[in-house]
């Protein structure tokens, strides 16, 4: 099911089947000046159905929003076997926002069979810059200030020393070796706006100790800067035989703090944690490296992972920013949600899939609140005069 | 087992404090909704108060209507029952303010104007501007997903609500979403609550994403003799490198109340950005206009102030929200013009032209005319899956005509199943939502 069913440029939308590869949609409309905004790093291989089900993000969702902000309507077969059409091209539809409710439900509500997505006009100008820093803390502070200053870059990605050397070793020297952290900053929009913002961003980076700020001179240089970023996860194979990839989020202003805590956690558990992540929205992607031949090392990596998650939640963050809960993180939901919250989600799922057929063990934990017969706490009313 | 009215009042008074309970018959009848006089009016000051009230209502099968500023109580059919009117305006605090993260958590009874005051001076805003927004509460705006011209750039509250704390029909306090700008942990409960008209829970707290305010914003007005020409121009703007913050269609009457230059139709284009970028985009807009033979002139920002005042909800008027398409705007406007007799041509037609949404406000229309208009519009928008919702109208108009319009049976069944799961007793806003939910 990988067809483009309709391209409707006057209304800036398209209808596609779920198996269509993300990038193919942009390819189909780019010559007419349009693109599909969600751009997970997996966009060459991941499907739009998968993007919808995980509410995928990507480097450019800082400015453009995640998948849910670009889905106008869905056709789906619910777990109960009903074919339903929800949402559509026109805005202002009456009733519950089922489209928004289904996006991100990881296939637990049913099978999505067609998707109406919004298309955006390709921005006029793009400027990509690389700022290098002598410390992660300085780079994190620069991120905080860029965001607080009112600039919304199209993308704001951070890479640490471990990732930089892995990329330089496996792909070729793309980033300065000596840097402890680099920020990949992309601005897009009307040319004059991009120019004005680029200057301010450079000033902020320098104020926070940037060793160098360089702007890609042409499309080739720009592609090279992104190549490193996009192939980062693969390059880590140089560092380690295996890694745990995390996807937690912290409020953006807490980046310097979580970076310090991460260092301490890595030291405590004697693991290398490499970082390449969506700094602009506080979405971390620590790669916790371990040797898969050592059960003991895996155990330490797992402990570091859980501790790091706890630290992110304690700072007001979230367990997963874009990769989804799946099987592995279901157990972590109680970090973020109470019993009543989990129970509400369980009951919502049961409406769509009463028999529990769809991805049964995904998303919700096995927890009493996610089972039949659980009663969340209600206010206690006075007895006596009352009843 | 039903208990006496006196003991319900007793529990409310004991839980909330007697000063938070209104039982005076005069005050109650003044608060009537579509002719239903509530038996109790309560003003909770905390989410725990709301939970206590709903727990009582659930046990006693009482119908509860939440109320913010009361500007959108005319949305949907009249309620089937009203026992408790839940006035949420005392829940008006800012709970957590994170300027550096561009997020804020507030109680749902705070007005959009109140929040704007809090944010003033730091060049951040919640860019949601349904007419009369300053008076509206954020809870009410969330329940109705109300939006204004800024949706062209910023979307609606659907895109801005990150987290919600609400009380379920049976009094259970529940949280959904996150406090950070990006999260896919668990289901997207905020989406379910935005636009649900409080029928699945009473929203008491919201965590919102803020946007930086552009350094400058300037508005230009393009004028047209026909709506087709206006539609074609909008298509050109959308298909260009311009990035307007607002792209609003206005008919002659709407231009008049906005104190804008007179013309059969106008398209107001606002550009918000850094100063040089605003200037440059303005020049491009002018160039686009002259290449298309369109008259374009800069207008003052007070056009939006007038827009906001003149289109704010008013007693007795009929307001329709129309989900059309950018490519069908002209057709839609023509249907409106045909259905309204000359005497009612004072209808104010506005809308986000970039998205194809329209709003029609008519004063003093007779119910038959409104019925015909709505039917004709539904016939048109039905062709492409659009919708026509009566946003407000006198009770008589809303009883003879389904204000929400049709929803596909399978889709409605799913909505009904959700309502049944979370409010099987019909405590929350009974009868006011789609399909009589
Ligand atoms: C190298 C790499 C980089 C990545 N980068 C990013 C990134 O930058 N941002 C990001 O958000 N994610 C990223 N991901 C994660 C993943 O690629 C995305 O989340 C993507 O959206 C998954 O799409 P898929 O087609 O592979 O779905 P699958 O993995 O096949 O499925 C994902 C989930 O959705 C369900 N599902 C799939 N199709 C349907 C359907 N039609 N109806 C109902 N349920 C369905 C599946 O059961 C499963 O639970 C990355 C992954 C890799 C391997």
Image (spheres, helix red, strand yellow):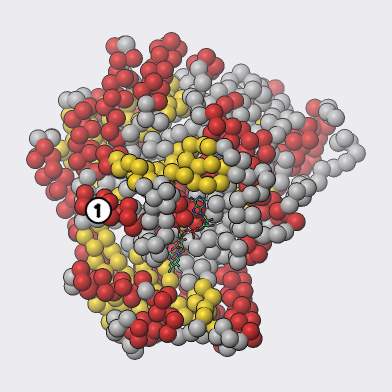
Residue B399 location (% of width, % of height): 54, 16
Q: Is residue A342 above or below residue B8?
A: below
Q: Residue furthest right?
A: A384
Q: Chain of mark 1?
A: A
Residue A185 location (% of width, % of height): 32, 70
Residue B142 location (% of width, % of height): 51, 41
Q: Which residue is mark 1?
A: A30
Q: Secondary structure at mark 1?
A: helix
- Is residue B217 visible from the viewing direction of this image? no
Q: Is residue B190 above or below residue B408?
A: below
Q: Quadrant of residue B347?
A: top left
Q: Residue at x 53, y 26 (%)?
A: B76
Q: Residue at x 60, y 66 (%)?
A: A328
Q: Residue furthest front?
A: A1
Q: Is residue A348 left or right of residue A154?
A: right
Q: Quadrant of residue B130?
A: top left
Q: Is residue B310 above or below residue A42?
A: above
Could you tell me which quadrant the C terminus of chain A lies in? top right
Q: Is residue A374 left or right of residue A196?
A: right
């Amino acid at each position: 099911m990988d067809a483009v069913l309709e391209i409707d440029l006057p209304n800036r939308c398209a209808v596609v089947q779920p198996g269509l590869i993300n990038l193919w949609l942009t390819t189909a409309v780019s010559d007419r000046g349009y693109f599909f905004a969600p751009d997970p790093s997996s966009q060459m291989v991941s499907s739009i159905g998968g993007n919808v089900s995980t509410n995928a993000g990507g480097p450019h969702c800082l400015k453009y929003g995640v998948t849910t902000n670009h889905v106008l309507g869905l056709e789906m077969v619910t777990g109960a076997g009903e074919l339903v059409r929800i949402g559509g091209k026109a805005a202002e539809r009456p009733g519950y926002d089922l489209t928004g409710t289904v996006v991100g439900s990881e296939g637990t509500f049913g099978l999505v069979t067609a998707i109406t997505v919004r298309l955006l006009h390709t921005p006029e100008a793009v400027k990509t810059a690389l700022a290098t820093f002598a410390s992660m803390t300085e780079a994190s502070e620069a991120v905080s200030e860029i965001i607080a200053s009112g600039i919304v870059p199209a993308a704001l990605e951070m890479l640490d020393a471990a990732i930089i050397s892995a990329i330089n070793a496996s792909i070729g020297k793309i980033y300065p070796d000596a840097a402890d952290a680099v920020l990949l900053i992309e601005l897009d929009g009307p040319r004059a706006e991009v120019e004005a913002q680029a200057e301010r961003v450079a000033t902020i980076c320098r104020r926070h100790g940037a060793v160098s700020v360089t702007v890609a001179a042409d499309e080739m240089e720009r592609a090279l800067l992104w190549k490193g970023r996009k192939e980062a996860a693969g390059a880590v194979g140089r560092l380690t035989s295996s890694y745990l990839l995390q996807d937690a989020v912290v409020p953006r202003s807490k980046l310097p703090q979580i970076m310090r805590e991460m260092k301490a956690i890595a030291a405590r558990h004697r693991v290398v944690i490499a970082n390449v992540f969506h700094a602009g929205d506080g979405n971390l992607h620590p790669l916790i490296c371990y040797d898969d031949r050592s059960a003991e090392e895996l155990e330490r990596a797992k402990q570091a992972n859980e501790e790091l998650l706890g630290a992110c939640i304690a700072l007001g963050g979230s367990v997963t920013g874009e990769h989804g809960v799946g099987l592995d993180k279901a157990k972590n939901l109680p970090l973020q949600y109470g019993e009543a919250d989990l129970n509400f989600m369980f009951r919502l799922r049961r409406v769509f899939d009463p028999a529990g057929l769809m991805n049964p063990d995904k998303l919700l934990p096995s927890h009493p609140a996610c089972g039949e017969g659980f009663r969340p706490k209600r206010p206690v009313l006075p007895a006596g005069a009352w009843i | 087992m039903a208990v006496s009215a006196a003991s319900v009042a007793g529990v409310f008074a004991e839980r909330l404090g007697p000063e938070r309970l209104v039982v005076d018959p005069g005050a109650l009848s003044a608060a009537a909704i579509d002719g239903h006089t509530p038996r109790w009016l309560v003003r909770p000051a905390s989410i725990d108060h709301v939970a206590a009230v709903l727990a009582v209502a659930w046990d006693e099968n009482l119908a509860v209507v939440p109320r913010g500023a009361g500007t959108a109580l005319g949305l949907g059919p009249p309620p089937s029952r009203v026992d408790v009117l839940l006035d949420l305006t005392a829940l008006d605090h800012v709970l957590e303010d994170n300027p550096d993260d561009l997020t804020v958590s507030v109680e749902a009874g705070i007005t959009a104007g109140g929040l704007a005051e809090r944010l003033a001076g730091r060049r951040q805003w919640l860019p949601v501007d349904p007419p009369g927004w300053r008076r509206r509460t954020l809870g009410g705006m969330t329940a109705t997903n109300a939006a204004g011209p800024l949706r062209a750039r910023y979307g609606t509250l659907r895109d801005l609500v990150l987290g919600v704390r609400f009380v379920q029909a049976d009094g259970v306090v529940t949280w959904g979403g996150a406090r950070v700008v990006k999260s896919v942990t668990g289901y997207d409960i905020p989406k379910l609550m935005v636009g649900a008209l409080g029928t699945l829970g009473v929203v008491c707290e919201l965590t919102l994403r803020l946007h930086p305010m552009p350094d400058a914003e300037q508005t230009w007005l393009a004028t047209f003799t026909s709506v087709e020409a206006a539609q074609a121009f909008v298509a050109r703007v959308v298909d260009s490198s311009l990035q307007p913050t607002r792209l609003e269609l206005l008919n002659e009457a709407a231009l008049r109340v906005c104190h804008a230059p007179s013309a059969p139709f106008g398209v107001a284009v606002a550009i918000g950005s850094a100063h040089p970028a605003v200037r440059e985009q303005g020049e491009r807009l002018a160039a686009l206009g002259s290449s298309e033979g369109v008259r374009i002139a800069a207008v003052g920002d007070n056009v939006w102030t007038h827009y906001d005042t003149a289109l704010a909800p008013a007693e007795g008027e009929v307001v329709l929200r129309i989900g059309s398409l950018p490519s069908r705007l002209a057709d839609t406007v023509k249907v409106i013009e045909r259905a309204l007799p000359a005497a009612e041509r004072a209808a104010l037609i506005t809308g986000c032209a970039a998205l194809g949404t329209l709003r029609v406000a008519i004063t003093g229309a007779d119910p038959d005319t409104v019925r015909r208009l709505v039917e004709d519009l539904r016939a048109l928008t039905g062709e492409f899956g659009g919708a026509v919702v009566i946003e407000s109208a006198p009770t008589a108009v809303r009883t003879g005509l389904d204000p929400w319009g049709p929803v596909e049976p399978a889709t409605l069944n799913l909505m009904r199943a959700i309502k049944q799961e979370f409010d099987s007793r019909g405590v929350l806003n009974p009868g006011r939502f789609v399909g009589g939910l």
